[in-house]
Image (tube, rainbow, N blue to C red):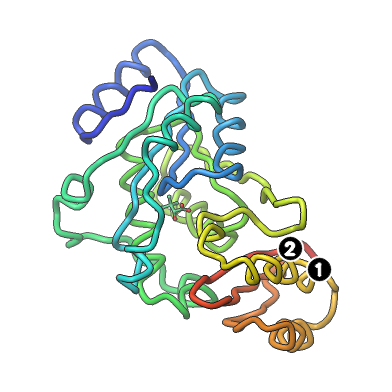
């Protein structure tokens, strides 16, 4: 059975032990409910490093909606098996009181890009994400940390934060993993009702049409999605839609 470390103190000691032995460390931060997207990050970390550490922590501060936080699937036993099979060496699974021993008095705030897109629809979301990621980077002090391109805005903000605070860990971007029908893998997909699951791949299909963002927005509404945004940023088209109670995000290169 894979080793599970539950306190920040023990995690710090274990990581120091790896560093003393000159073993390189790859960190894959997750909130659990592991799917093939996460497993691809673990696989990449396995290929690049001597030791692979997965954190599983459902981070309360990145949720503005308590119902959404409550609904996040907690599947620790299955996650441990999947992480081990994908090549992880250990899992860090800390308690919220340990991560937020300061009562979230100190937090990281980005004052520009984090206010757009996801940030405009989820108040305080990126403060919570950036704060927990900085804490995890400081606890593990990995050589590399792996983030999926599905959360494109998160990836850019984490990368910029790491540069802003001179974090030594390299931030590695990994491609989106999709179901055979194009739906981006996400822990939220399990909540889609059967008819919503049938409709969900239309989201990715429409984002790829090369139409204007206004036209894609219209097509998505006509297909039956609630649309939070469709927007171009750099070489990406990013979107967020709602199907019933499930919110999906995705992005494609254009
Ligand atoms: O992408 C996620 O799963 C989370 O936002 C992260 C990076 C693990 C921080 O809680």
Residue named by callout 2: 252
Under circle 1, the secondary element is loop
Q: Residue 48: percent from the left, percent from the top?
A: 59, 25
- The number of numbered discs placed on residues in the rendered structure image is 2
The single residue placed furthest to the top in the displayed view is: 21
Look at the image and tell me in which quarter the N terminus lies: top left
When the figure is inspected, residue 181 is found, relative to residue 137, above or below; the finding is below
**In the figure, residue 161 lies in which quadrant?**
bottom left
The single residue placed furthest to the right in the displayed view is: 210
For residue 208, the mark is: 1
Asked whether the residues under the numbered discs 1 and 2 touch, taking CB atoms below 8 Å apart as contact, a structural biologist would say: yes
Between 85 and 125, the residue placed more toward the observer is 85
Q: Residue at x 26, y 29 (%)?
A: 12
When the figure is inspected, residue 221 is found, relative to residue 125, above or below; the finding is below
Give the mark, 1 or 2, whose residue is nearer the N terminus.
Answer: 1
Decide if residue 209 is on the left or right side of residue 12. Answer: right
Between 132 and 89, the residue placed more toward the observer is 89
Decide if residue 2 is on the left or right side of residue 43. Answer: left
Q: Residue at x 50, y 59 (%)?
A: 157
Q: Residue at x 67, y 71 (%)?
A: 233
Look at the image and tell me in which quarter the C terminus lies: bottom right
Q: Residue 82: percent from the left, percent from the top?
A: 50, 32
Could you tell me how far apart the alpha carbons at marks 1 and 2 are, in whole angstroms?
7 Å
């Amino acid at each position: 059975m894979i080793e599970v470390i539950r306190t920040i103190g023990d995690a710090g000691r274990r990581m120091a032990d790896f560093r003393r032995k000159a073993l390189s460390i790859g960190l894959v931060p997750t909130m659990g409910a592991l799917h093939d997207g996460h497993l691809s990050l673990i696989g990449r970390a396995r290929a690049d490093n001597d030791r692979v550490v997965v954190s599983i922590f459902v981070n309360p501060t990145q949720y503005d909606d308590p119902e959404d936080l409550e609904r996040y699937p907690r599947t620790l036993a299955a996650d441990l098996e999947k992480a081990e099979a994908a090549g992880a060496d250990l899992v860090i699974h800390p308690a919220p009181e340990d991560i937020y021993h300061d009562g979230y008095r100190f937090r990281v705030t980005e004052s520009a890009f984090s206010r757009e897109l996801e940030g405009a629809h989820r108040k305080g979301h990126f403060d919570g994400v950036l704060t927990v990621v900085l804490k995890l980077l400081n606890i593990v002090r990995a050589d590399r940390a792996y983030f999926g391109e599905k959360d494109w805005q998160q990836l850019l903000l984490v990368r910029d934060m790491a540069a802003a605070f001179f974090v030594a860990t390299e931030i590695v971007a990994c491609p989106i993993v999709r179901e055979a029908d194009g739906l981006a893998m996400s822990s939220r997909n399990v909540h889609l009702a059967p008819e919503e699951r049938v409709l969900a791949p239309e989201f990715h299909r429409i984002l790829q049409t090369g139409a204007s963002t206004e036209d894609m927005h219209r097509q998505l509404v006509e297909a039956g999605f609630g649309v939070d945004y469709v927007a171009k940023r750099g070489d990406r088209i990013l979107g967020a839609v709602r199907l019933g109670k499930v919110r999906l995000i995705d992005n494609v290169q254009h």
